[in-house]
Amino acid sequence: MTAHPAPADDAPLLSVRGLTRRYGARVGCEGVAFDLWPGEVLGIVGESGSGKSTLLSCLAGHMAPDAGQVVFDGRDTVTMAEPERRRLARTDWAFVHQNPRDGLRMGVSAGGNVGERLMAIGARHYGAIRAQAVDWMGRVEIAADRVDDRPARFSGGMQQRLQIARNLVTGPRLVFMDEPTGGLDVSVQARLLDLLRGLVREMGLSAVIVTHDLAVVRLLADRLMVMKDGRVVEQGLTDQVLDDPQHAYTQLLVSSVLQA
Amino acid sequence: MTAMIEITGLAKAFTLHNQGGAVIPVMAGGALEVHPGECVGLVGASGAGKSTLMRMVWGNYLAQAGSIRVGTLDVARAQPREIMALRRGTLGYVSQFLRVVPRVPTRDVVAEPLRALGVAEGVAQARVAELLAALNIPERLWGLSPTTFSGGEQQRVNIARGFAHPYPVLLLDEPTASLDPANRAVVLGLIEAAKARGAAILGIFHDEGARMRVCDRTVDVRAFAPPATAPAPA
């Protein structure tokens, strides 16, 4: 592995230009451009079919874009060789799926799920791996005595916290999240939001969070991007976009939310 | 001494795309300065644009024209990340409503601005305890989420959070609105202490007694009404 200098304070960690993905004649996402700096959380909102999940897949290397650049820490992840991209996905990146079953191995113990990511980057000492797994389960508020249980026996909220532990144990710099609070009860969502906020701050993580929930982005995201029909129609500070939306679609989105 | 807030030529209009594209001008030619150690009160009838002006300084409302210098940054032209940095260290805001993640304990809500600045946990918690005690929030409530508190208690938690870090610039939107006389006096004391340490404060105070006590002067936002305006939205 080549050594890469840490980006300077004024250099973005992730720099995206002209990112486009089509499905035949249909647009998945088109001409998306943004910069993400270390420690920043970017929210992406839009209704179903707006292209936000396609965009996240292209950013995370799960899908090849038709055009554009995704430059992470000075390297274009679109043109890099597949092994290098896979290595990034194991080390510097993490991906939290909406459905924890897509991000966990359901037949493996909770501790095994966390330890597996460590082994993938070369950890070999069983005791150390187990200790780190237990430590991370504690950080996501799962009791240590559940370390040998399979995630299938966990509640949805616990599964989601375990998925977060599995993702963050390797100390990534960039986390992609697809509707991380999507399938959860409201009370469980709040706990997860608080947990994510704390982890982002303590670890200095950058994150890209796709959601349709404006309350979630208000509490979690520093900046917000609004997508419609595959294009970014508005972006800015989260509270600015939500409190003083400029685009017709954003105004509709914000005014459609029920006040609890 | 150089002003900490310097606003010139500030203009604002809302365009309501889903209501026939109606354009509602609310401000033109807005201008004011706030110097270190000074508290300036915004006055003018409800709907005249006091809160709108304050939100433009905070950066959650966009300006159509003009400049809003806070410290060394022109908020009207700044990138989001520059405003984020300004809000972390320089610009504090006590809004009228507390907006927090549910279930987060009060002491963590108040400590959050200090943690974001990397203040050591012990130092942060000592400051939090000092503020919550001064604002008469009973200690048994500190471990509970403020979402279940009364309006006055939530407002005091909001004030504690806004005063946790000694920001050089403070925006205060009705900080004494729902407080009893004892707590109102505490808050006015906090404002006077902030002035004494050199903070530049821009505030909205419907409470005339409070305004008389802490404001060095007032600025009437009706002077910034756009020509031939319809009444502005609240």
Image (tube, rainbow, N blue to C red):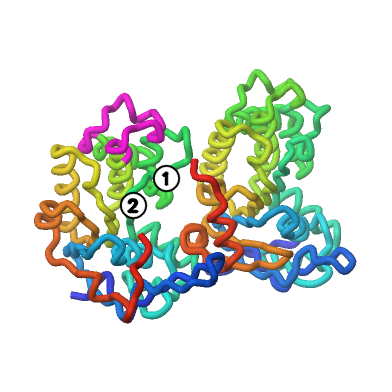
Q: Which residue bears the numbered disc 2?
A: B95
- Disc 2 and disc 1 in contact, CB within 8 angstroms: yes
Q: Which residue bears the numbered disc 1?
A: B99
Would you identify the image quadrant in which residue A104 lies?
A: top right
Check the image and name the residue furthest to the right: A24
Q: Give above or below for B228 relative to A159.
A: below
Which amino acid, by three-letter code, is at mark 2?
Ser
Residue A92, given in percent of the width and then of the height, sits at: 69, 52
The stretch of residues the image draws in magenta is B133-154
Is A20 one of the magenta-colored residues? no
Residue at image point 56% right, 46% down: A216
> Residue B135 vs residue A10: left or right?
left
Residue B157, given in percent of the width and then of the height, sits at: 31, 40
Give the quarter of the figure containing the N terminus of chain B: bottom left
How many angstroms separate mark 2 from mark 1 (CA)? 9 Å
Which amino acid, by three-letter code, is at mark 1?
Arg
Residue at image point 87% right, 69% down: A25
Neighbour tally class for label 2: few under 14, some 14-19, many 20 plus, Cα within 10 Å: some
Is B141 one of the magenta-colored residues? yes
